Amino acid sequence: MHERRLIGQPAPETPPELRSRSGRARPLPPDLLRQASRRLQIMALVAATLWVTAPLLAHVSLAFSRPGQPDWGYPVAADGISLGAFIVSLSLFFYLRTGKCDPERVLDLGLAYMILTAFAIGVLMHWGPRTDVPIGVDPVISWIGPVLLMMAAIVPVAPRRMLAAGFIAASMDPLGMIIARSAGLFHFEHLSGAILMHYPTFMLLGVAVVISNVVTRLGQQVSREREMGSYVLGELLGRGGMGEVYRATHRMLARPAAIKLIRPEVLAFGEGESAQTAITRFRREADAAANLRSPHTVELYDFGVTDDHTLYFVMELLEGMDLDTLVRHHGPVPPSRVVHILWQACESLAEAHASGLVHRDIKPANIHIGRLGLRYDFVKVLDFGLVKHVSARRPADALAGDSLATAAGMLPGTPAYMAPEMALGDAVDGRADLYALGCVGYYLVTGQPVFGAGQGFHAIVKHLNDTPVRPSERAGIRVPAGLEETILACLKKQPDERPQTARALQEMLERCGVERWREEDALRWWSELRAAG
């Protein structure tokens, strides 16, 4: 186990691989930077729309207020400025949409866009047919002020950078007046008058700097709270019923990993005895899962509990996809590949069952295939952190028989893949996992769950009472008889009628008359997938 550090303890110095390219520690994790990029993308699209509609509405308004004038007093140069700002905004939108920009560089891009927008506003606001306008008498707030406030909230840059870029942007109002004077549209003697006229914009810059400081500190707080032991969290990979999974990096080894967080609000426990009971279960189950050594079981690197009772698992980061994604995107799986996948899953379950552990949530989303070293279609069984131990229980040892999911008041398992004995609340052993694995095999062969798309109680009732339709009849395709019989044997209602062990199921798969998927078949499939993009 790696040394674990709980939240609230001083963090070690940020290693070089986690620093920004400029050498500063990143104020926000990568996924939050990407969210800032998406917000900037939306703002650019809205701005592009406004740069078209605002001049159009101005033309319509002047057409009614100044009839008979060819240009209604609206300068052609103003249309040119609006068109240029529209092109810049739309270009930024499409560039950010490609996702090619480094999320950290989006911050610099946002500041540059803010300055260019302020320049267009500053010139456009003063580019008109007016002359002899009194300067320094009536202070005004131009649209540059709101732009500063919006950018401070959308692009979370350091306050000093916001101050420098914001000062340049706020200065575009006086600069616009100077440009207008050079075009003969304004006449004033002292530059100080132009600056004093727009002092409210500079005051709003101060507010923008405060907002930027608040947003940056929140980002830094998120970064600190995402430090789990020796790991720093990155982007969000997915969410499940019990928690969230993030990409993570080890501080010293620079080793990629995945961290699953189980928040205290999900477990619905607070302080005192209930919290300690759940943490005790978590430590027991994580320790048991960490001792599984099958190469087909996802490796558990570390686990811990933070100061706010957030539980976390640190697991290996996998390359590939789960079986649910495989079927949804690519359809039913060839029989030879089904045998190959199920056989490997049995390798993982055989070790777990020999250790007295039952997974209880075998389903396509919890079985992963991908690359491991030079091997492809390598199966990993996921989510062994929430197993149940089936060792004999004594009254004084009742805690040992309950799982963390049970402690959270959740029904363990997934209804569409739940063995009848689990649905009835009876004692379960490894044969419940083999029933679920039979459901997975049925799904792989047919592309459909055993009992259709029913959810919740409806699916449970079908698993209790209905007889499965043969896969070949269900899918309307030829399924080798030996594989079909093996899958249906796993789906027997009574545990005694199923294969009794994962090893026994492996032997049935080997005798089913289907040649297993070869390594060259897997390599070809994954190569074609990469080539297709």
Image (cartoon, helix red, strand yellow):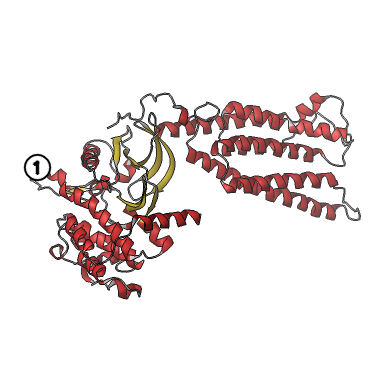
Query: Is residue 489 toward the left or the right of residue 137 in the image?
Result: left
Q: Position of residue 375 (x, y in %)?
A: 35, 49
Give above or below for 178 relative to 405: above
Callout 1: SS: helix
Which residue is drawn at the image coordinates 28% and 39% (left, top)?
Answer: 270
- Numbered marks: total: 1
* Camera-side residue of 226 and 385: 385
Q: In what quadrant of the picture does the N terminus appear?
A: top left
Pick the front one: 496 or 217: 496
Left or right, 302 with respect to 400, comes to right
User: In the rendered image, which residue does mark 1 sit on?
Assistant: 396
Give residue 160's position: percent from left, percent from top. Answer: 60, 26
Q: Residue furthest front?
A: 520
Q: Residue at x 27, y 36 (%)?
A: 271
Residue 339 higher or lower than 480, as above or below = above
The percent position of residue 496, horizontal first and vertical second, equals: 12, 63
Whether residue 519 can be seen here = yes
Q: Residue at x 52, y 39 (%)?
A: 33
Can you give x and y, in whole percent of width and height, for residue 378 in the image?
Answer: 33, 51
Tell me: 462 left or right of 124. left
Side of 484 relative to 427 (left or right): right
Q: Nearer the viewer, residue 483 or 289?
A: 483
Question: Is any atom of residue 416 visible in this view?
Answer: no
Q: Categorize mark 1 by other alpha carbons within 10 Å: few (<14), some (14-19), many (20+).
A: few
Residue type at tag 1: Ala
Write down the quadrant of residue 267 in the picture.
top left
